[in-house]
Amino acid sequence: MSVLLPVGTKKGLFLLRGGDDHGAWDVEGPLLPRWSVSHAMVDPRTPRSG
């Protein structure tokens, strides 16, 4: 099972993706650059690839 972890920071939103191998995380972002993101969540009803 893969894991998608949204991380909000003062520099924007980052998406961390982890796989079954328990190795390194893939980091995507910053999304919404220069926006201060205080919280984010993933809707489990929305299909996602990866």
Image (cartoon, grey):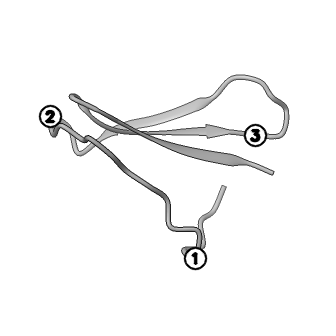
* Kind of residue at badge 3: Gly
Q: Taking 6 as reference, is 41 above or below it? A: below
Q: Is residue 12 left or right of residue 35?
A: right
Residue linked to disc 1: 45
Q: Residue at x 67, y 46 (%)?
A: 3
Q: Residue at x 75, y 40 (%)?
A: 19
CA separation in Å, label 2 and label 3: 28 Å
CB contact under 8 Å: marks 1 and 2: no
Q: Residues within 10 Å of mark 1 (few under 14, many from 20)?
A: few
Residue 34: give its label.
Answer: 2
Picture quadrant where residue 32 is located: top left
* Kind of residue at badge 2: Arg
Callout 2 secondary element: loop
Q: Position of residue 22 (x, y in %)?
A: 80, 28
Closer to the chain start, of discs 2 and 3, is: 3
Closer to the chain start, of discs 1 and 3, is: 3
- Quadrant in the picture for the C terminus: bottom right
CA separation in Å, label 1 and label 2: 28 Å
Residue linked to disc 3: 19
Callout 1 secondary element: loop
- Nearer to us: label 1 or label 2: 1
Picture quadrant where residue 14 is located: top left
